[in-house]
Image: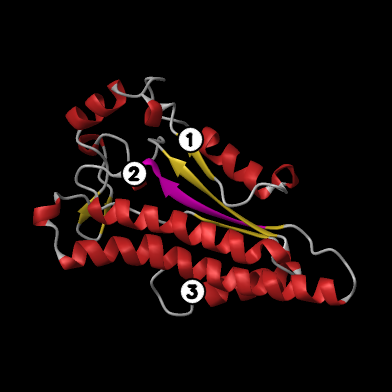
């Protein structure tokens, strides 16, 4: 996501293989948690660059392609096809201990997505974001039970902190991958053709507890 040309290559490949680009979902990311007073510029920029800048790069290229196709359809007297931008935010976007970098990036994604929704409305480009709570991935599994790293960042949650966190979730568990994918499929489908600018929370009721 940080390599020059990645986003352009993805958009070009989609257009070449499928003849167009109807939806894009961004979900790349990792965490590099540390309390704010100990956070280094490297930790800040690493997370911002992958999550926020990476989302910008990919959606920017996809949006340009979608907008061009919509303009062609309008010039031909047709109603533009509904095209979708779906981004992945997080419950951490509301603020979270040890995640100033991650929280800032995920909050920024929501703002970016809503701006895309406003600008894309006249072209029938719908943009929405999904804010996840804990999902069963390498980011939320007990750190002591896995050996997952991205650079110097060790992924996962300390077991004791994870147990306390899960005890505060009304549903009492993490979500499954299938439960995480379902909302993305909905927002990318024709069932969501009048949904734009929304932030869908998928967190087991954690945000209202």
Q: Position of residue 46 (x, y in %)?
A: 27, 65
Quickly name the residue at label 3. 6
Q: Position of residue 7 (x, y in %)?
A: 51, 72
Q: Nearer the viewer, mark 1 or mark 2?
A: 2
In-front residue for pair 191/155: 191
* Crowd tier of the residue under label 1, counting other residues whose Cα lies within 10 Å: few below 14, some 14–19, many 20 or above: many
Is residue 28 depicted above or below 64 in this figure? above
Residue occupying the point 71% across, 69% down:
17
Side of 99 relative to 196 (left or right): left
- The residues colored magenta run 84-92
Quickly name the residue at label 1. 202
Quickly name the residue at label 2. 94
Q: Nearer the viewer, mark 1 or mark 3?
A: 1
What is the C-alpha distance between the residues marked 1 and 2?
Answer: 14 Å
Which tag, 3 or 2, sits closer to the chain's start? 3
Q: Position of residue 208 (x, y in %)?
A: 39, 27
Side of 2 relative to 65 (left or right): left
Magenta-highlighted stretch: main secondary structure? strand
Q: Secondary structure at mark 2?
A: helix
Q: Quadrant of the C terminus?
A: top left
């Amino acid at each position: 996501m940080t390599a020059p040309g990645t986003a352009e290559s993805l958009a070009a490949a989609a257009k070449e293989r499928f003849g167009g680009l109807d939806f894009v979902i961004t979900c790349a990311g990792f965490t590099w948690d540390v309390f704010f007073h100990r956070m280094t510029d490297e930790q800040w920029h690493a997370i911002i660059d992958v999550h926020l800048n990476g989302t910008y790069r990919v959606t920017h290229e996809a949006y340009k392609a979608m907008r061009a196709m919509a303009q062609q359809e309008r010039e031909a007297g047709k109603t533009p096809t509904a095209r979708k931008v779906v981004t992945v935010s997080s419950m951490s976007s509301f603020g979270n201990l040890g995640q100033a970098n991650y929280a800032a990036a995920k909050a920024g994604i929501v703002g970016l997505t809503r701006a895309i929704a406003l600008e894309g409305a006249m072209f029938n480009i719908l943009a929405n974001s999904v804010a996840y709570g804990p999902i069963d991935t390498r980011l939320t599994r007990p750190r002591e039970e896995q050996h997952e790293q991205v650079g110097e960042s060790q992924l996962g949650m300390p077991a004791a902190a994870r147990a306390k966190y899960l005890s505060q979730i009304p549903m009492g568990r993490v979500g499954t991958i299938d439960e995480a994918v379902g909302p993305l499929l909905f927002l990318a489908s024709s069932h969501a053709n009048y949904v734009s600018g929304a932030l869908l929370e998928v967190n087991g009721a954690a945000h209202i507890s």
